[in-house]
Image: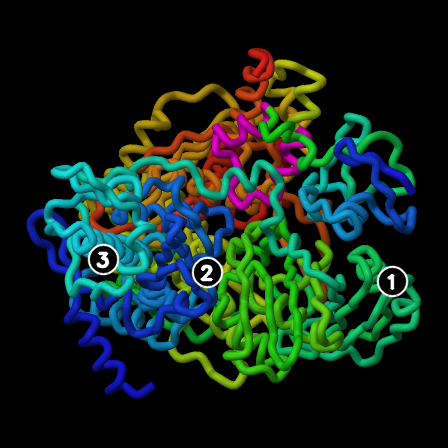
Amino acid sequence: MTMSRLRKITRRVFLIGAATVAGGVAVGYWYVTRPYANPLEEGLAEDEATFNPYVKIGSDNTITVIAPRAEMGQGISTTLAAFVAEELDVPLELLTVEHGPASSAYYNEIMMEESAPFPWWDDGVLASLARGAFGTVATVLGIQATGGSTSTRDGFDRMRQAGAAARHMLVEAAAKRLGVSASELRTKNATVVHDASGRSLTYGEVALDAAKVKPPSTLRLKDRADWKLLGKPQKRVDMLAKVTGAPIFGVDVLLPDMLFGTVKMNPVYWQKPRSADLSKAEAVKGVVKIVPLETTYGHGFGVIAENTWAAFRAAELIEADWGTPDYPADTAAVDKVLSDAIASGAATAMRDDGNVNAAFADAPQDRVIEADYSVPFLAHTCMEPQCATALFKDGRLEIWAPAQLPTLVEYLSGAAIGVEMKDVTTHTTSMGGSFGRREVDATIYAAIMAKAVEGRPVKAIWTREEDVRHDTFRPAARGRLRARLGEDGLPTALDIRVAVPSIFANMMRRTFPSISPLGADVTVTQALRDQPYAIPNYRVSGIETDLGVPVGFWRSVGASFNCFFHECFLDEIAQQGGFDPIELRRRLMKDFPAALAVVDKVAEMARWGEKLPQGTAKGFAFSLCFGSWVGEVVQVKDTPAGIRIEKVWIAADVGTAIDPGIIEAQLTSGAVYGLSAAMGQEITLSGGQVEQSNFHDFDAMRINQCPDFEVAILENHHKMGGVGESGTPCAIAALANAVSALKGERIRALPISKDLAFA
Amino acid sequence: MNLTINGQAIEIDADPDMPLLWALRDIVGILGPKFGCGIAACGACTVLVGGTPVRSCSLPVGLVEGAVTTIEGLVKGGVLSPVQQAWLDEQVPQCGYCQSGQIMSAHALLEEIADPTNEEIDDAMGGNMCRCGTYPRIRAAIKKAAALKLAGK
């Protein structure tokens, strides 16, 4: 895209920006109606009307809301539906909530905005302009994506506007039908009511007429004080299905004449197998066909069979010379590459306050502390292994999959078998977890398999072993942190270098290998360059270090390791400087009231500072990530069976809390995910191949290890933050700090179970 | 071979070595039990055989002795079982994928122990992994279900 086009669009975005007026917020309706056509226009029933890409109403008063973000457990279908329901004046239980079609109309603007390298608190002109421009790219490229803890924030304005616009049109149509002024009408429970005459019309009764009403040019959204649904915990719309075992997931797709399959990919990444013997696999009863998979994601075989079990057995019997790796082949080699990079790699400073070099140049040795921290590769292990169903018929491709990036799925899966995006249809299922894993590989493989048995759908489910070994891993990373302490014990200089693969560059290799990514990868220094600490000389540098292994977005991305580096080193500074860990943070973040409030809250909840019984310790960590300010305290206890994680306290400032029940669940979930990793998870390599394969050697926290939780939700900051990932980073760092306090020895490498057992 | 699944006699044409999970899912079309690991390590596939919770991914269908109950069999006359009702009340599931297995394990636990302690809950549920970390709400829901059952609801 040319810059002039981008500028023009940016200006248009700014021109229609929201303006606050008394009695609600008036906003331009351009937002929801442009620049894409309404994908619901296609496939409407005769007695059904659509008002915008988010609302459909049938004459029978069936109201369908499109929640175009993938439901991976984070409750997003409920929250997005509640936005529409609030403004449409309809109780949630009267709505039918659907994911809807893959369409660029459902682009994720916030996700792109947060790719801009500016800290969250920076409301400066440059930062705002950059955020606006990045968001505009999402609009133009039309990326429908679920991730980055962005969905609620992205939907907040757009979907409330969609509900308000539809309500406006329904009221106008009802006024005309009743021969009264719209101002005499009110709405309630999907009905337009004329109190003066006692007459009423259901939304369904006026829907077809209402869809012809010109949408309003400006809308007035409800004041927060008038919210009936938002700000309060709602019953989730997907709960009944999930307590009755309803077939809603990718693995549950059942189609007439369907075949079943799985994949066996080269465990040596990126390479073609040198030779393969498929004879034993092909001899398995029930096997229909074995097809080569040659893709930008990897090379291997797709096994198509009459049932999944036959496909699994056959895949196990494929014999191949998989070749040798052209990347660091074992964990020692990975460590060496990262260590070399930390020592001498080319660094990009992403934060550089004061003069760090000068501050260290004349520092007395006893005022300087330095430490290296490291983390391993991690798998996501969603409970639902990677899977997709595809049907190739009459030159068209149809996909059913738990897709986090449905527009990208259509483009790349189609391209893999020579089908244009316009001839691809995607049905997005619920997903059995994602945590950042659901990319495009499973659908590309399923498309290739479907083409080999044209006319019959193929449901390809990966074995857990393939899912673990062919993940897009949380990258291994290393940090080197150096501080100079002043006479008062506070740091006068902090210099941080982090060496880690670029996730974006690695993802481009898988998805668009011909395009080189531009600029520094913001995930490298995420939650490190942008923390609300004031230190006079403060430098954060990223060293993008390719390790060859596929890496991707793992719950909380760069924050998953950077918070551990930063917050554990702050504990070291506190110890050296003679400060209580929380008091040190309070001093450094004194200019950030939202941060202080969170820290004070969690300290109060956890009774921080009270004397603990022998063999018990607490650890603290803070992180500003995904727009939310989070403080966590973890309490651990020594037991004969190992360390027991007893309790976790979380305080999070999310700006505006749309659904406190879901927020509490997400923060807790994120913490359990982080604790699992910090306790015991690591992916290691031997001969370039992943050594772990299933839950026996890549386990996660079980109920018997799960601590009690206490969560407080604050709303001090003026911008809304995300919660899907924000609970994870602090749990990791606070656990490490707690164990360090318990044992009197610093935890600087994960997982902790390498040295200590957990009960 | 003949199986009784959720009270219905069903004839299945399958290799007796095929795990019960895949016979249910791919042949019978019962999709409640989920595939998670294939090695009885995660519990997503848990069903009851003769009232005992088993990991159906690792039990050959030819060795099944006793009536099979899947989550589809817990709803009686359109009414949720106490465990399901408690799961709904406590809003337990997030992604929901492991929850069929969790509910089946909890159901079996409460059939055996009417009012389990935290330790008994941990023991009975330790084989059911949840990557979303819904464990605190699972604990609350099991206690609620126990209360519902004791109250005869």
Image quarter where the C terminus of chain A lies is top right
- Of badges 2 and 1, nearer the viewer stands 2
- In terms of secondary structure, where does tag 1 sit? loop
Residue A442 lies left or right of residue A366; in this view the side is right
- In terms of secondary structure, where does tag 3 sit? helix
Vertical comparison of B84 with A237: above or below: above
Dot label at residue A286: 1
Mark 1, other Cα within 10 Å: few <14 / some 14–19 / many ≥20: some
Q: Residue at 8%, 53% (x, y): give it.
A: A21
Identify the chain of the residue marked 2, using the numbered disc in the image.
Answer: A
Q: Residue at 62%, 41% (x, y): give it.
A: A245
Residue closest to the eye, B151 or A480? B151
According to the picture, the residue beneath numbered tag 3 turns out to be A169
- Mark 2 or mark 1: which comes first in sequence? 2
Which color mode does the image show? rainbow
Residue B109 lies left or right of residue A565; in this view the side is right
Task: Respond whether the residues carrying marks 1 and 3 are from the same subunit.
Answer: yes
Three-letter amino acid code at the position of disc 2: Gly
Magenta-tinted stretch: B82-105
According to the picture, the residue beneath numbered tag 2 turns out to be A100
Vertical comparison of A561 with B43: above or below: below
- Residue A126's image quarter? bottom left
- Of badges 1 and 3, nearer the viewer stands 3
Three-letter amino acid code at the position of disc 1: Gly
